[in-house]
Each structure stands twice: as C-alpha cells, then as structure tokens.
Amino acid sequence: TFTNVDNSKQESFGKKAIYEVTKEGLKKVEKMPEATVLDGNQFAWSLKGYSDREIAKVDYDKTAEEMKIKLEAGVPHSYFASTYASIKVQNSSGNVLYNKEIVGNKQQNAESQTVPVKVGDYIEFTHIEGEATKEKTRATLTNLENKKNETIGKTARYQVTKEGLKKVEKMPETTVLDGNQFAWSLKGYNDREIAKVEYNKATEKMQIKLEAGVPHSYFTDTYASIKVQNLSGNILYNKAIEGNRQQAAESQTVPVKVGDYIEFTHIEGEAQKEKTRATLTNLENSKQEYIGKKRIYQVTSMGLLIKS
C-alpha cells in the first residue's frame, strides 16, 4: 500500500509502481528515464588510426577527478600530413590543463599521463575521420558503467557536470598566457626590433636574439632589459640594453622550466604610441598583449602567470 501522510488517503500500488517527483507531489509514470552514454562517473574514449589500430585511450573517473591518457607508439595514419586527432582539457577559466595534437604521418612516442579533471572542466576531442562512413568508429565514447557507446564525430566537446558529461558547442577561450609557446618583441627607434625572445615550455628552452645597432639614441640609460631567474634566486640570464650605445648582435639559448621567473622592462612600454614596442605573443592561439614598463612572469604547468 501507499499512504499520503498529509491527507491519510491510501491505495494499493500493485506489483510495481513508478513515480516522478513534481512540485505538486508525485505523478505516476510508465517507466524510468534510461541512463544515456553521458550519465555517470566513468567514461572511456578511444581514438584509432590506420587499420583500426588504437593510437590513444582516455579513461576518466569523475569520482576520483582523474583522467588517464595513454598514447601508443607508432605512426597514426601515414595518409595524413597534418593533425589527425587531438585531445584537450581546459578548466572553466580557459586555462589549458592538457593539450595534445597527433599528426598523422609522424612517429608518435608512447606516453602516459594523469590529468586532474573536475566538475566544471571541459574536454575536447577531434578526429579527422570522425564522420567518415566506415572510419567513424575510430573515434568513440563508452560509458563504463552502463556500457553504452557512441561515435563522437570530427569534434566532440564536453563539460563535466554533477550528473556526468554535457555536450557543449565551444570551449572557454584561452588567454595570451595559456599554452607552451610564447614570443616577446622589444623594439626601439622607428619601431626597429632590437630583441626577440622565443620560449618553448615543452622543450624548456628560451632563444634570445639581440640585433646589432643603437636601440634608441634619445635615451642614455637602460632602454630595455631581459632577466631570467630560477626559484632559488639564481640568475640564468641578465641583459640591460642601453638606449644610445651600440649593441652587438647576440644569440643565446637559456634553459627555462616550470617555476622559473622571466622579467622584461621597456622604458617606453606605457607611452601612448610607443607601447607597441614591448609585446608578448602566444604562438599557439596568436593572442597578443602589451607588457608595459615592467612585467614579471612565472612559468607554470599551464603557461605563464603574471607576478607583477
């Protein structure tokens, strides 16, 4: 029997009764809604290449907030000379937590990584053959709890929710500070480039190139400077560029890793017109910003963090 405690009414509900909770109380329904491939806590994506060989497997446990990414060694698909598949994870602020592009005809190394992924974060997969009639099965999502699966197409984007996964149209935009590859440009009189700095976080190398000439004859003191320092305070590179002095051409490679600090100064960095003479460019998303008179960055696992 079923009893309404408020009005004392009672009824027998037979062999089986299913109710939906509403604002008014309870409503009888014929069946419970079925769980979909997106409902739950445990999911797996499979990306395959030539001859249906698995090139990447991604397992996500929402309860543990861990995503395990495993890339297999080998050439994914020699017919494709550009990006064949990709995996990207971002948080709700747009910070990139993981980003991997798999080129079709390039040798891929075996790689395993665990990425923290929690409710609110975003996950994106691409696969160049994701919509091909036969080959679309090379990009799939499987719900490890209810065993449902589906092909994900050329591009699939999800946001992690309390219930599981939710398909979304786009990821939060990344900023100029997110990623692995950056370039700074310092210019002098007549907008001539006097120094160029390129940093690849993945290789932990910073290439510094100084151009020969007088940077800006109107300034007799330090016109611009570049400094790199590690967490212990040890100076890895330090260059003061005098405005009216002849500068010799110079190229140097400096090791820079996560935790290290990078500092730039430019005397005209806040001038109305001349502020364009001190810039940072993200080489991955092409975003750019002025750095002002002085800017200090710390290298993080996600990219760069402005310290002052």
Image (spheres, rainbow, N blue to C red):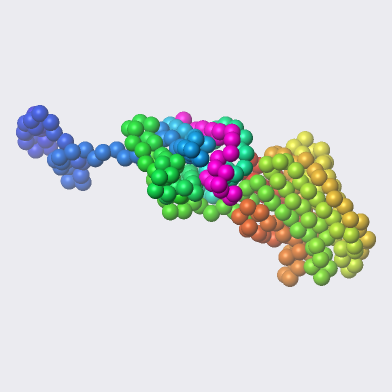
Query: How far across and how far down the image is residue 129, in percent?
Result: 47, 47
As displayed, is residue 215 above or below residue 18?
Answer: below
Q: Which residue shows up at 72% across the image and 54% down it?
A: 183
Relative to 8, is 95 above or below? below
Which residue sits at x=53%, y=54%?
173
Residue 182, image x and y in percent? Answer: 69, 51
Residue 143, above or below 244: above
The percent position of residue 101, horizontal first and vertical second, equals: 57, 45
Q: Nearer the viewer, residue 267 or 175?
A: 175
For the residue pair 290 and 256, the one nearer the viewer reads as: 256
Q: Taking the image as drawn, is residue 232 in sight?
A: yes
**Horizontal arrangement in the rendering, residue 297 relative to residue 96 (left or right):** right
Residue furthest right as drawn: 246
| Most foreground residue, 91 or 205 | 205
Instruction: Tell me which corner region of the image, top left, top right, bottom left or bottom right, holds residue 244.
Output: bottom right
Q: In the drawing, does residue 3 fall left or right of residue 269?
A: left
Tell me how many marks there are: 0
Stretch of the chain drawn in magenta: 64-86
Residue at 15%, 41% in the rendered image? 29
Closest to the observer: 240 or 34?
34
